[in-house]
Amino acid sequence: MKKTFTHLDEKGASRMVDVSAKNETERVAVAQASVLTGPETLAAIHDRKLPKGNVLEVARVAGILAAKQTSSLIPMCHPLNITSVKIDFTDNGKDNIYIRAEVKIVGKTGVEMEAMTAATVCALTIYDMCKSVDKGIVIEDVHLISKSGGKSGNFIFNKED
């Protein structure tokens, strides 16, 4: 089976994939990221005692903005009319914040990169807002959890695959 590269033309030049012939469908992508902090930092985030303000709400807004700007950051991404971005935070109660970014569109191309960008920028924003009290923060486990819609169908992340 010969692989073809969709972002290269027949001469090997870079190109944006032509999606004009594709059908518009609802497409949803969910991505995650994890931010490992010290226990004192997580407590300060919850108690809103960090000098830069409400860390999680600023990170949520940053993630939403990032999803909308993905095509400006990733060269071959299409500019999209995103219909929804939802960012949720959970934690393990001691030292890890989990970010879940869900992006929706009715369109001709998927929103996996927008969800991944949103989750990553949320994590970077948490780092930025906490670095004055905790320089040892680690951002990890950024990946696509699921996607639906489009020609390639559904995908659900399975660590064993």
Image: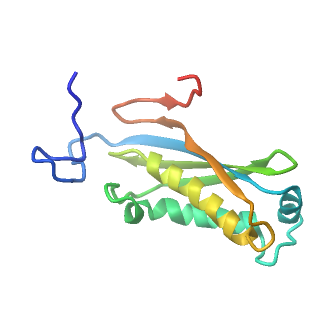
Q: Residue furthest left?
A: 11
Residue 41 at x, y percent in the picture: 84, 62
Q: Quadrant of residue 123?
A: bottom right
Q: Report whether 51 appears left or right of 17.
A: right
Q: Please report the residue visible at 65 percent of the width from the left and 66 percent of the height from the top.
A: 125
Residue 113 at x, y percent in the picture: 45, 50
Number of numbered discs: 0
Please determine whether, in this image, residue 88 is positioned above or below residue 136. Answer: above
- How is the model colour-coded? rainbow
Q: Please report the residue visible at 79 percent of the width from the left and 48 percent of the height from the top.
A: 91
Residue 129 at x, y percent in the picture: 72, 71
Q: Please report the residue visible at 35 percent of the width from the left and 55 percent of the height from the top.
A: 77
Report the quarter where the N terminus lies: top left
Q: Report whether 64 appears left or right of 134.
A: left
Q: Please report the residue visible at 76 percent of the width from the left and 48 percent of the height from the top.
A: 90
Q: Residue furthest front?
A: 136
Q: Report whether 20 appears left or right of 152.
A: left
The residue nearer to you, when weighing 37 against 111, is: 37
